[in-house]
Image (cartoon, helix red, strand yellow):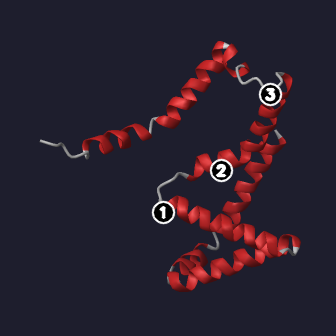
């Protein structure tokens, strides 16, 4: 409940602070993009460096920024990526623990009906976006008369 209460308090504080500053935010939005972009980039670089006074943090930020740009350019959604980054460590730990218990036997994931159905569903959902692309590729093959 403390977490939920802190969220409510934070939202009330944001409203109280941002209502008087609406004019300032509108003026900031009127700044041309070629001027605003380098300023945002500078603040991000300074913030990344100031965390631990490490250039490695800045490089990680730059690599993640480039990856984010490429993901957006090629139409990938950000939510699954963030979910994967957050849950990936726990998933890997659980996978490693399961494989250690079964001495590396992968059939443990297909022995129970629930896990087998969920794994098959996950595999199907991964393959599903590829099906229309496969159909388009087959229709482009020239027919020989």
Label 3: state its secondary structure: helix
Q: Residue at horizontal 70%, vertical 49%?
A: 85
x then y, percent, for residue 110: 66, 18
For residue 12, above or below residue 141? below
Q: Residues within 10 Å of mark 2 (few under 14, many from 20)?
A: few
Q: Is residue 34 left or right of residue 116?
A: left
| Distance Cα–Cα, label 3 vs label 2 | 26 Å
Label 1 SS: helix
Front position among marks 3 and 2: 3
Labels 1 and 3: the sequence-earlier one: 1
Could you tell which of marks 3 and 2 lies nearer the N-terminus?
A: 2
Nearer-N-terminus badge (1/2) = 1
Give the quarter of the image for residue 115.
Answer: top right
Image disc number at residue 82: 2
**Residue 73 numbered mark, or none:** 1
Real-space Cα distance between discs 1 and 2? 17 Å
The quadrant holding residue 100 is top right
Q: Residue furthest left?
A: 145
Determine the residue located farthest toward the front in the rendered image: 145
Q: Is residue 43 above or below residue 75?
A: below
Q: Is residue 117 above or below residue 82?
A: above
Q: Residues within 10 Å of mark 3 (few under 14, many from 20)?
A: some
Residue in the image at 69% along x and 81% along y: 42
Quarter of the C terminus within the rendering: top left
């Amino acid at each position: 409940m403390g977490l939920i209460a802190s969220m409510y308090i934070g939202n009330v504080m944001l409203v109280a602070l941002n209502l008087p500053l609406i004019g300032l935010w509108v003026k900031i939005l009127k700044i041309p993009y070629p001027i605003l972009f380098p300023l945002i980039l500078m603040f991000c670089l300074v913030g990344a460096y100031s965390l631990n006074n490490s250039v490695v943090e800045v490089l990680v930020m730059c690599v993640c920024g480039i990856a984010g740009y490429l993901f957006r350019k090629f139409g990938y959604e950000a939510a699954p990526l963030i979910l994967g980054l957050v849950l990936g460590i726990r998933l890997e730990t659980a996978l490693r623990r399961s494989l250690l218990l079964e001495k590396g036997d992968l059939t443990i994931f297909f022995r129970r009906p629930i896990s087998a159905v969920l794994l098959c569903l996950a595999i199907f959902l991964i393959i599903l976006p590829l099906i229309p692309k496969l159909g388009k590729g087959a229709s482009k093959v020239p027919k020989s008369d």
